Amino acid sequence: MSEFVIKIEDEIVQTLGKQAIEHYLQLFITQTILKAAAGDLLKDDDADNLTEDNDWINAKKNAFLNDRYSQYIKVYANV
């Protein structure tokens, strides 16, 4: 594991608070890891070239046919 020392102006720490800054940094690191993983997945996806794979095309058609009414389903959170 690596350790980094980040220097932040005292005024910023006083304004935002140490916990908020720690939270933002952790969130930033998490998002960066997810973006890197997504990039790796996209590279793998491009290499597979699924546009000519008959199994993929059939699965895509079946998924659409089985889910064609989902546009009419609305989910309301915290109602």
Image (spheres, rainbow, N blue to C red):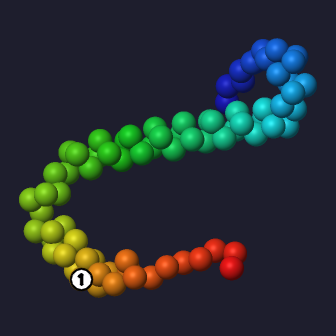
Compared to residue 45, the image places residue 70 above or below, namely below
Is residue 78 toward the left or the right of residue 36 in the image?
right
State the residue in front, 75 or 52.
75
Quarter the C terminus occupies: bottom right
Inspect this view and state whether residue 20 appears: yes
Q: Position of residue 29 (x, y in %)?
A: 62, 36
Q: Which residue is mark 1?
A: 65
State the residue in front, 78 or 13.
78
Amino acid type, callout 1 = Leu
Q: Position of residue 2 (x, y in %)?
A: 67, 25
Q: Position of residue 8 (x, y in %)?
A: 79, 17
Secondary structure of the residue carrying numbered label 1: helix
Local crowd size for mark 1, using a 10 Å CA cut-off: few (<14), some (14–19), many (≥20): few
For the point 46% across and 38% down, which residue is it? 36
Where residue 68 sits, quadrant-wise, is bottom left
Compared to residue 61, the image places residue 19 above or below, namely above
Is residue 31 toward the left or the right of residue 70 in the image?
right
For the point 72% across and 24% down, which residue is it? 3
For the point 82% across and 15% down, which residue is it? 9
Where residue 22 sits, quadrant-wise, is top right
Is residue 14 toward the left or the right of residue 61 in the image?
right
Compared to residue 39, the image places residue 56 above or below, namely below
